[in-house]
Amino acid sequence: MAQRRSVAEVGESVLQDNYYPCSLESESEKVFLKICVYILIGAGSLIMLVGFFGCCGAVRESQCLLGSFFTCLLIIFGAEVAAGVFGFLNKDKIIEDVQNFYSEAYLENSNSTMILSYQKVVRFQTTLNCCGTKSNPCDAEPESENKDCETKIKDFFDSKLFIIGYVGIGIAGVMIIGMIFSMVLCCAIRNSREVI
């Protein structure tokens, strides 16, 4: 139960923390952060509700709660499949958006002394071990293997997307097992009541 609650608590702590909104430049970034936080809070609450249906349905031998548990798992499973398909179909667009985000921050940083743009650029460069853009590369030492950050962003997504896919398949497998067990238990409860 603690893990389920922690997803919602992470969202609530980010919402109440004054640091995160201040570190964002534009109003659209602040709105995007709030949307993500509300999604986290909603997901944590939904997970708690689904867990409640499953536990109470099994303990009380309630067909209604087990049916609700199955339905919720089916809806979440469908949403995960839709999100996965959307992510794989729009992978190139997502990579392009992240590259554009970095390029804009890099240009803002080189044109002015904006601290927030500098922080974004440094965060990208240290995380991905890269420097500059394709059109404006950094003057790195020749023996250095630093690539431009746009290439490294594409390499990062290409290498990590399969891991995300495998984790998604694993989660989907667990959800399918949960749906099967809830239906088996629901049928067993119905059959035991018919015998009595």
Image (cartoon, rainbow, N blue to C red):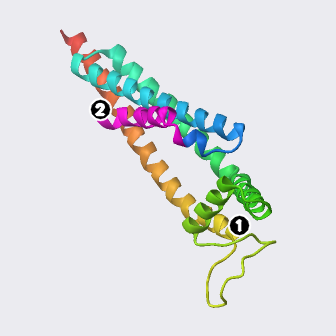
Q: Nearer the viewer, residue 175 or 123?
A: 123
| Mark identifier at residue 150 | 1
Please, which residue is most extreme toward the left here? 196
**For marks 1 and 2 on the same chain, the one whose residue lies earlier in the sequence:** 2
* Rendered position, 181 above or below 64: below
Seen at 64% across and 44% down, the residue is 24
Q: Type of residue at label 2?
A: Met
Quarter the N terminus occupies: top left
Q: Is residue 120 left or right of residue 139?
A: left
Q: Main secondary structure of the magenta part?
A: helix
Q: Is residue 112 left or right of residue 174?
A: right
Q: Nearer the viewer, residue 56 or 176?
A: 56
How far across and how far down the image is residue 150, in percent? 71, 66
Please check the rendered image and state whether residue 139 is part of the magenta-colored stretch, yes or no: no
Please check the rendered image and state whether residue 8 is part of the magenta-colored stretch, yes or no: yes
| Mark identifier at residue 108 | none
* Rendered position, 142 above or below 5: below
* Rendered position, 112 above or below 175: below
Quarter of the image for residue 136 reads: bottom right
Asked if residue 77 can be seen in this view, the reply is yes
Q: Which residues are magenta?
A: 1-19
Q: CA distance from mark 1 to mark 2?
A: 41 Å
Q: Which residue is mark 2?
A: 1
Q: Type of residue at label 1?
A: Glu
